[in-house]
Amino acid sequence: MTEGPILIMANKTKRTLNPGFSSLLLESMADGVFTLDDKGRITSWNPSIERITGYNAEEAMGQPCALLNFTQCFQKSCPTGIEDCGILQEGRLDGRECFLRHKEGHDVPVIKSARVVRDENGAIKGVVETVTDLSELKKARREAEEASRRLREIHRFDNIIGKSHAMQQVFSAIRAAAASEATILLQGESGTGKELVAGAIHHHSARKMMPFMTVSCSALSESLLESELFGHVKGAFTGAIRDRTGRFEEADGGTIFLDEIGEISPFIQVKLLRVVQEREIERVGESRKRTVDLRIIVATNKELAHLVKSGDFREDLFYRLKVFPITIPPLRERREDIPLLVSHFINAQNRKTGKNIEGVTQSSMRILMEYPWSGNVRELENAIEHAFVLCAGGYIDVFDLPVEIRQLAYRPGLRKAPPVGRAKALSARKLSPEMLLEILNDCDWNKAEVGRRLGLSRTAIWKYMKKWGIPLKRPIPHTF
């Protein structure tokens, strides 16, 4: 605003603007403009400030500025007099975002600026204030935030996040599975979120108010898994000092999720087949049949069809379990979901740690997008958690990421994801004792991981080790 119009507005001897260009200019302005005399009384009031505040010129003229009850000027609230305001001492106020109180009692978001006007001798003649209405901008922000929230909801199903076509197909399959009572087979690599999918199916089904039980079949030996699933009676074996209800009974009326189903022994396979077919169980050490009403969901990171061909998995059980198969894609096949997942994990870590990290740098995102993610979503989540430990700024940078991800970023030849058929190629090769020992050492003698690399079950690995006289645990080196 130029000095001329300000002087005209601040003239405390006149209650209205003089006709002419200046008054026409003020009347046409979208911003609200009003002036005060040196006592803080309103001396002019343009049409826009009438619209913003609800007060017409007759109601406002001669009133103190406190009429508008600004939430912020130089202080936290509007004082009763101009002497306490601070504008006379400071001389100006630039772009203060605050609220004013509308005539009807609601708050209006505005940006307020003010200038003290002096005569040629430096004496204060008055104050000119401008008010920009932010109502439409705030509304647009709210609509944008709501649209963003709805978009995030569209791209997630419970705690499963993804906007890719592959994940939208998974979401459709979850809805279809939840509406049925069919046995579900979830297939996907480790870390893709099979347990989350199982939980989503249960919590959107008619059984959602009933129990949801999870059992990791690879974590227990055959005898312990049998007791865990079917329960036992007192005295069934050494240490069975009381009756125990198994997970199948505990899940009665609800859903049981059996993870790593490809790891179960032939004996457990036979017992599971009866449950799938007849919904009947027998506790260990008891001949009484018990009926259970439950939904069965199983998951594996193996190709069960290959285990059937190799004789490691019963064909009749396989076909009973794959009534409705759902394949969950690995992260490297849905890279467009990585930014959504990164944002989700950052928000989760912000809540957990109290930090306020806003995102990742462009170079970091490029690395995250190119990394093969053999551990899938679980590995990405761990990478973000690692970065939170190191990140001291507002954005996760390259050197906040785990070292193995950074190193791969600077080795262009290793950036590509491993071929999908690599595990099949390994399993097709003739396995030898020397090769098995090499892979055991590479996998730190984790037989389940060896099986995953070779496309064989853990039971098959155990049989090969027994056949070739390889100890089940890593040999302790002799010292001399």
Image: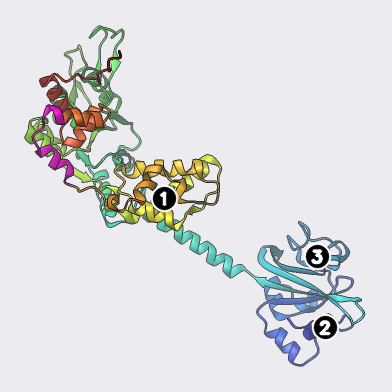
Circle 2 SS class: helix
Circle 3 SS class: helix
Q: Quadrant of residue 215?
A: top left
Above or below, 101 against 469 in this view is below
The numbered disc on residue 66 is: 3
Q: Tell me the kind of residue under disc 2.
A: Leu
Q: Would you name the residue on which mark 2 appears?
A: 7
Q: Is residue 317 left or right of residue 357?
A: left
Q: Calculate the distance from the C-alpha at mark 1 to the C-alpha at mark 3.
A: 48 Å
Q: Calculate the distance from the C-alpha at mark 3 to the C-alpha at mark 2.
A: 22 Å
Can residue 163 be seen in the rendering of this structure?
A: no
Q: Nearer the viewer, residue 103 or 72?
A: 72
Q: What stretch is highlighted in magenta?
A: 421-435
Q: How is the image coloured?
A: rainbow
Q: Quadrant of the N terminus?
A: bottom right
Q: Nearer the viewer, residue 354 or 225?
A: 354
Q: Would you name the residue on which mark 1 appears?
A: 342
Residue 21 image point, x, y percent: 74, 92
